[in-house]
Image (tube, helix red, strand yellow):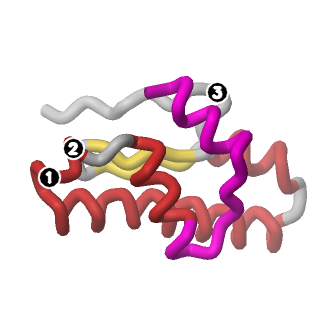
Amino acid sequence: MKHLKTLQEEDLGFAEGGQVGVNIELLWEMTQKEETFAEEFAKTMTHELMHMLLAEALGKKLREVPVVVEEAVIRHILGEEWTEEIAALYMEAS
């Protein structure tokens, strides 16, 4: 039986072990409008699915890629914001 990963309060989503999770409560608190929520939900799902696709494409080689680099690549592909402050958060978490 698979166990679901628990989202941290500040996490918008995760992709791990073939599972994708989205923190819908946090997304709703951030958006407060159905249309905006739907857009942000779709963006978050796409972002997390990109993590899974990258893992599938690279296999064990992904372990050699620092998390901050993986995140930067995915954000670049999706046209998402990437700043020194965001990079620092991923460096701290590594």
Picture coordinates of residue 86 (x, y %)? 67, 43
Question: Magenta region: which residues?
Answer: 76-94
* Residue indicated by mark 3: 9
Q: Quadrant of residue 63?
A: top left
Q: On the rendered structure, is 55 left or right of 10?
A: left
| Residue at horizontal 62 percent and vertical 33 percent from the top | 89
* Residue indicated by mark 1: 61
Whether pointer 2 and pointer 1 mark residues with C-beta atoms closer than 8 Å, the reply is yes
Q: Residue furthest front?
A: 84
Q: Secondary structure at mark 2?
A: helix
| Residue at horizontal 28 percent and vertical 67 percent from the top | 53
CA distance separating discs 3 and 2 = 28 Å
Picture coordinates of residue 30 (x, y %)? 83, 48
N-terminal label among 3 and 1: 3
- Quadrant where the C terminus sits is top left
* Residue indicated by mark 2: 64
| Residue at horizontal 19 percent and vertical 35 percent from the top | 2
Q: On the rendered structure, is 86 left or right of 54?
A: right
CA distance separating discs 3 and 1 = 30 Å
Name the kind of residue labelled 1 in the image. Answer: Lys
Q: Nearer the viewer, mark 3 or mark 2?
A: 2
